[in-house]
Amino acid sequence: MDFDILIVGAGLAGASLAAALRGTSLRLGVIETRPPKAAADWDARIYAISPSNATFLSKIGAWEHLDHDRIAPVYDMQIRGDDGGRIDFSSYDSGLGELAWIVESGLMQRELWEIIKRQHNVKLLCPAVPASLARDDEKSSIFLEDGRRLDARLIVGADGVQSWVRDRAGIEARFSPYGEKGVVANFECEKPHHGTAFQWFRKDGVLAWLPLPGKRISIVWSAPDEIADELVALQPSDLASRVAEAGDTLLGELHALGQAQAFPLRLMRVDSPVSQRLVLIGDAAHAIHPLSGHGINLGYQDAQKLSEKLAALPGWRDPGDIETLRSYARARAEETALLQYTTHGLNRLFKPANPLVSGLRNLGMNLTNRMPVLRNALVRYAVSGKF
Ligand SMILES: Cc1cc2nc3c(=O)[nH]c(=O)nc-3n(C[C@H](O)[C@H](O)[C@H](O)COP(=O)(O)OP(=O)(O)OC[C@H]3O[C@@H](n4cnc5c(N)ncnc54)[C@H](O)[C@@H]3O)c2cc1C
């Protein structure tokens, strides 16, 4: 047996799982096709990291080592409907330090990579491309394209939404495309954002402005395919004017920092993320609409929960034991389903429809805004996963 656990994919989910298993005696192999790229400029792929996931990253030794000059706290969030609806969330009113942290994907990726590169119980196999997968009662095996054979008691598929592991394990993924793309880009703004995030439910999609350090913001505009394609094709200065206008020029004029990128949005579900000697985490196990900003937060929570289950096993216990895997799957099922259905439902609710639905959804936002107890409970749930 070469390894106790083979993790396929060292993205944020896979690398954080490996780092979280640092204190165990488990022998880990991590297979990755390519190492993370060095930073060129501000990464357009950013995440709103919840305080509970910042704590997880801190526990695994990553948070403190990130360049904090590149991280922005979110203190307030303003959400606006398409017909006068509005909800405001405030960390101060909710008794919290901050609602979230805005962090570049590449920044976290490189830090986690450095951690696992130095980790005593990790063998990093990169660049390496898996070619086939075999499983029996005793072990799982991966054969690499270069002919190497790797045996392990458990395989973790952390290889993203197009997961090779999921496909080879015969776990069916049900994709529901939204017919939308997430357009991401960064801007310098004329006025300070004071740590406020803004989100507009518009007729042409959901637009989020997320604060970056200084007078910068990052946007995610989840728009129907044809509008997203049009946005990405715009000259940077035209895109900046369009984004500023769509956000009621709340932060004055915008100046584009680099090129916009777009990624297709889809809901992806599996019946179960576990099967014989195998488990899926992160985007390999679920994909959700980015309007709640929970994509990688779910992936980090998968990594945290799975690492806790594995670390709690006595030394003689098999990490590929199906009961342990099922217990992990049960522990993650509720939050994953809740976020998938909530974001899916919100996306549906705010699709252009008849005026009655539009009136009701905006009224609902205004009613929620007038109920501080409900509003603050929603904030606490969003940041900690608990009411
Ligand atoms: C352009 C873009 C912008 C995005 N912006 C946002 C955003 O603003 N907010 C948000 O919430 N989400 C966003 N997302 C989605 C978000 O990136 C994912 O939710 C998150 O990266 C999932 O992390 P992961 O580790 O599960 O998978 P991934 O990040 O996909 O990592 C998978 C890893 O596995 C490796 N891999 C793949 N196949 C193999 C294989 N066969 N063998 C070995 N290794 C393999 C890959 O190289 C990669 O390192 C964006 C996605 C894209 C593409």
Image (tube, rainbow, N blue to C red):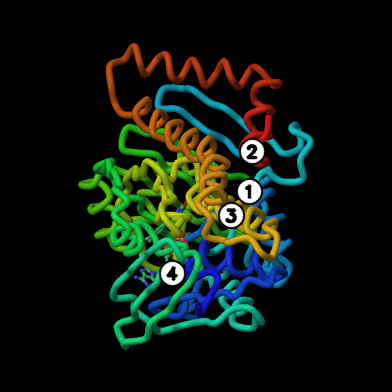
Q: Amino acid at mark 4?
A: Val
Q: Position of residue 164 (x, y in %)?
A: 32, 64
Task: From the image, state whether disc 3 or disc 1 is nearer to you.
Answer: 3
Q: Is residue 143 above or below residue 219?
A: below
For disc 4, the marked residue is 8
- The part of the image, by quadrant, that contains residue 236 is bottom left
Q: Position of residue 159 (x, y in %)?
A: 40, 64
Graded by Cα atoms within 10 Å as few (under 14), some (14 to 19) or many (20 or more), the crowding at tag 3 reads many
**Image position of 94 (left or right of 247):** right
Q: Is residue 120 above or below residue 336?
A: below
Disc on the earlier residue, 3 or 1: 1
Task: From the image, state whether disc 2 or disc 3 is nearer to you.
Answer: 3
**Cα–Cα span, label 2 and label 3:** 17 Å
**Image position of 7 (left or right of 17):** left
Disc on the earlier residue, 4 or 3: 4
Disc on the earlier residue, 2 or 3: 3
SS state under label 3: helix
Q: Is residue 164 above or below residue 145?
A: above
**Cα–Cα span, label 2 and label 4:** 27 Å
For disc 1, the marked residue is 50
Disc on the earlier residue, 2 or 1: 1
Graded by Cα atoms within 10 Å as few (under 14), some (14 to 19) or many (20 or more), the crowding at tag 1 reads many
Q: Which mark is residue 385?
A: 2
